[in-house]
Image: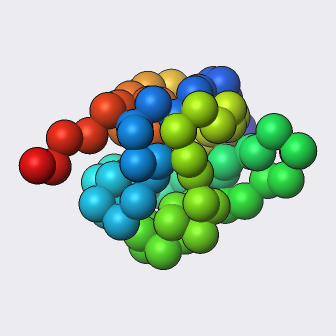
Amino acid sequence: MADKMEKVIVIQNSRGIHIRPSGDIAAALRGYEGKAFVVMEDGKCTEITSSPLSIMALALRKGMVITVRVEGPKASSKLSELAELFSKCYDYT
């Protein structure tokens, strides 16, 4: 049976999750055999993939509260990695 874990996260990045953070998050999903989802405050659940567009389409802004859910092998470690990336304050200047 595959592991399933989730964590509530507040988006911290001042510009939200735009293209560059989306690319970092997508890269973390490349090669992962399980699935990852973002559940919005209204309950809408969307699968995210190794495509940055799947993450950008969520239009995540600073202060939004989301739940990241991971289902599959090593769900705990993948969830920790994704939680850190979603809650990170990115500085690309």
In-image side of 48 versus 47 (left or right): left
> Is residue 2 in view from this perspective?
no
- In the foreground, 87 or 69: 87
Is 10 located above or below residue 66 in the figure? Answer: above
Where in the figure is residue 2, as x and y percent of width and height? 66, 39
Give the residue drawn at x 45%, y 30%.
12
- In the foreground, 41 or 50: 41
- In the foreground, 19 or 68: 19
Is 44 located above or below residue 53 in the figure? Answer: above
Is 41 located above or below residue 87 in the figure? Answer: below
Give the residue drawn at x 81%, y 39%.
41
In-image side of 82 versus 1 (left or right): left
Give the residue drawn at x 52%, y 62%.
55
Q: Quadrant of residue 39?
A: top right
Where in the figure is residue 75, as x and y percent of width and height? 53, 34
> Is residue 91 in view from this perspective?
yes
In-image side of 13 versus 70 (left or right): left
Image quarter hosting the N terminus: top right
Q: What sort of colour scheme is used for the picture?
A: rainbow
Where in the figure is residue 52, as x and y percent of width and height? 41, 69
Where in the figure is residue 14, as x and y percent of width and height? 40, 39
- In the foreground, 22 or 89: 89
What number of labels is visible? 0
Give the residue drawn at x 66%, y 51%.
37
In-image side of 14 versus 1 (left or right): left
**Which residue, as the protein is rendered here, is positioned at the far right?**
42
